[in-house]
Amino acid sequence: MAPQGHLAERGRSWTELLEPPYALSAIVVVLCILAPAYSAFITATVLPSAIADIGGLAIYAWASTAYAVASILGSAGSSVAVSNAGMRRTFVLAAGVFVVGAAVCASAPSMPVLVAGRGFQGLGGGMLIAGAHSMVREVFPEALWPGMLTTISCTWAIPALSGPAVGGVLAGLGLWRTAFWVVAPIAVLAGALTWRILPETGRGGAGAARVPFGRLGLVCASVLCVGSIANTGGAPARVALFGAAIALVALMLRLDNRARTRLFPTGMLSPANRIGKGFWMIFLLGMSTTPGGIYLPLLVQVLHGVTPAESGYLYALQSLAWTTGTLLSAFVPPARVRWAVVLGPLLTAVGFVGLVLTISSGPMGAIAASLILIGGGIGTAWAHVGAAILSSGRPDEGAVTASMIPSTQLFAVSLGAALSGVIANAAGLGGGASKPTAALAGAWLFGGFVVAPLTALVIGSRLNRSA
C-alpha cells in the first residue's frame, strides 16, 4: 500500500515513479545520489587508516571541509550550468570531476593531497546532488515531489548498509586507497545514463547565464576562514578569522540582492516567511549531521577499540535512521505534518544529549541508540520541510529554489565540519588521539552541536504559521 501522506492527498501513488515516463529519470536521480553517498560512508570508514599511513591528524576535519566547500561551488553553480549547457552536459561534467577527485585521493602521498582530491570529489558530487534535486522539480509533477524527496533520502540507506563493510574490509587489508576507486563506476554510470535519456537543452551564446563565481567564492572563503581557526595560534588571529567570515557572508548577501543572476531565491534567509523558515531548518538539521559523520569513527576506535568496519556501521546507523524516519513520516496525514516538523528536531537534540553522556564510557548500545535518535529525527522532518520550500518559492525561481536545498545542506555541512575541527582541536585532539583527549573532544563536540536541533525545533514550531 502506498503511503497516505502527501501523495494520497493529491490522488497520486508512489508506484508512478516506477512506471513510464518517470522510471528512467528516477533511476538517474538515484545514481546521482549514490556516488557522493558511497563516498561519504567509505571515506568516513577508511580515513582513520589513511591518517595512520600518511599522517595529518591535525587537518583531519579538512577532508570533510574541503569536500563540503567544493560541494557548495558545484551545487550552487549547477543551476547556471544547466541553463547554459543543459542537464546532460552538466551531469557528464560533474561525473568526470568526481572521478578525477577519486583518482587524486587514491594516489595521495600526503594528507594535503588527499584533501585536494576530496575537493574535486566535492565539486562533482555537489553538481550531481543539486542536479538530482533540479530534476525532481523539472521532470516530475508536484504531486510526486514528496515521493522523490523521500526516494532521495532512502537512497542513502544503500551505501549506509554496504559502504562501511566495503571500507572496513579494504581498510583492514591495508587497501584504503582502493576504497576511493570503488565509487568511480557509479559516477560514470550516472553520467552515461544521463547523456542517453535526457534531451539536449541549454541556451548558451549571448543569452547564457553567468556563473556567479565571485559570490560563490565569498561563501567558500567564509567557510575556509572558520575552518582555519582550528589550525591558527593566538586569540587575536582566531577572532580576526571569525570576523572575516561574517564580513564575507554579509558582502556576498549584499551583492546577491543586486545581481541579475541570484544565488538565493527571494526570502530564503528571512525567518519571517515560510520559505525562509524552511531553509533555516535545512541548514540547522544539515549541520547536525557533521560531528558524528566526521569524528565518530575515530572516537569510537580510540575510546572503545572497535574495528574500522564496526565504527563505519555505527556511524551508518545515523543515516539508516534518517531513511527510516523519512519513510515513516511519509505515512503522516497532512494535518499532522506540523507535528512531524517539530518532533524531528526534538529527537535529534535528545540524541546529542545521549552522546554527551555515553561517548566516553559507553555502553556501545547507548551510543548506537543516540545516533538512531539523531538520524531518525532529521528524517522525520526533512522531506516535509523540503516540500514546504518547493511549494513556497516564486514560480520564476523554481530552479534556484530547488538547487538551493542541497546547496544549503552542503553549506551547513561545510560550516559544521569547520566548527567540528575547531572544537576538536581546542579539546586537544589535533595533538594526538589519546583516550582522555578523545573523551573530552567527544563531549565538547556533541554538547556544542545540540544548539542546532534545538534552534530548528523553535523554527519548526512556526513553519506553517505563515506563507
Image (cartoon, rainbow, N blue to C red):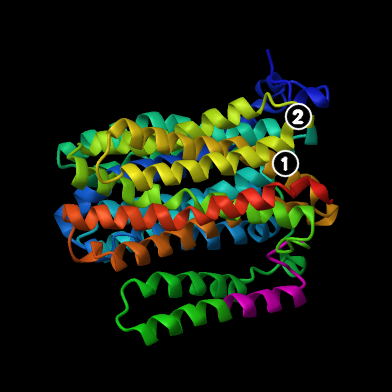
Left or right of 52 on screen, residue 165: right
Amino acid found under the numbered disc labelled 2: His
Left or right of 350 on screen, residue 332: right
Residue 49 drawn above or below residue 209:
above
Image coordinates of residue 17 in percent, x first then y, are 68, 25
Local packing at callout 1 (Cα closer than 10 Å; few below 14, some 14-19, many 20+) is some
**Residue, x 64% and y 59% (percent of image)?**
81
Left or right of 367 on screen, residue 288: right
Q: Are marks 2 and 1 in contact (CB under 8 Å)?
A: yes
**Residue, x 55% and y 38% (percent of image)?**
377
Image coordinates of residue 42 in percent, x first then y, are 33, 41
> Predominant secondary structure in magenta?
helix
Q: What element carries label 2?
A: helix
Q: Which numbered tag is attached to residue 6? A: 2
Residue 92 drawn above or below residue 28:
below
- Residue found farthest to the top: 1
Residue 342 drawn above or below residue 213:
above
Q: Sequence order check: which comes first, mark 2 or mark 1? A: 2
| Residue bounds of the magenta highlight | 248-265
Image coordinates of residue 137 in percent, x first then y, are 73, 42
Q: Which numbered tag is attached to residue 387? A: 1
Inter-mark Cα distance, 2 to 1: 9 Å
Local packing at callout 2 (Cα closer than 10 Å; few below 14, some 14-19, many 20+) is many
| Residue 333 is covered by the magenta coloring | no
The reply to whether residue 108 is in sight is yes
